[in-house]
Image (tube, rainbow, N blue to C red):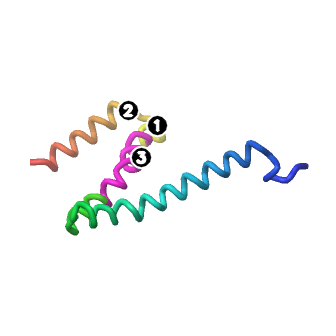
Amino acid sequence: MTPLFENRDFVRLFSAALLSNYGSMVRGVALPWLAVLVLDAEPRHMALLGAAALLPGFALGLLAAPFRWGLELSSCFRLCCGLLRRRLP
């Protein structure tokens, strides 16, 4: 049995995951920092920036839910649109 770090595929996968995580950490610090220093962002802008970072995961969760529960995507989409119509003026 060969050690893991001698396996070329594992080393490539590990390196890619390491770089991806490092990039995410840098983005998490650099983006708000640049927003404050360069764009003179106010606290409400920083809150919107933080909320925008969560939107992709929320959207993917909404798209994955119908498949988990065995529903059609169109029925989930209609449900979400109906909820948004009630909340928006």
Which residue type does callout 1 highlight? Phe
> Nearer the N terminus, badge 3 or badge 1?
3
Q: Which-is-in-front pick, marks 2 and 3?
A: 3
> Residue 27 vs residue 87: left or right?
right
The label shown at residue 73 is 2
Q: Could you say where residue 85 lies in the image, as x and y percent from the top left?
A: 16, 43
Q: Mark 1 falls on what kind of element?
A: helix
The answer to which image quadrant residue 52 occupies is bottom left
Q: Which residues, given as a range, are shown in magenta?
A: 50-64
According to the image, label 3 marks what residue? 61
User: Is residue 68 placed above or below 4 in the rendered structure?
Assistant: above
Magenta residues: mostly which secondary structure?
helix
Q: Mark 2 falls on what kind of element?
A: helix
Q: Mark 3 falls on what kind of element?
A: helix
The label shown at residue 5 is none
Which residue type does callout 2 highlight? Leu
Say which of 18 and 73 sits in front. Answer: 18
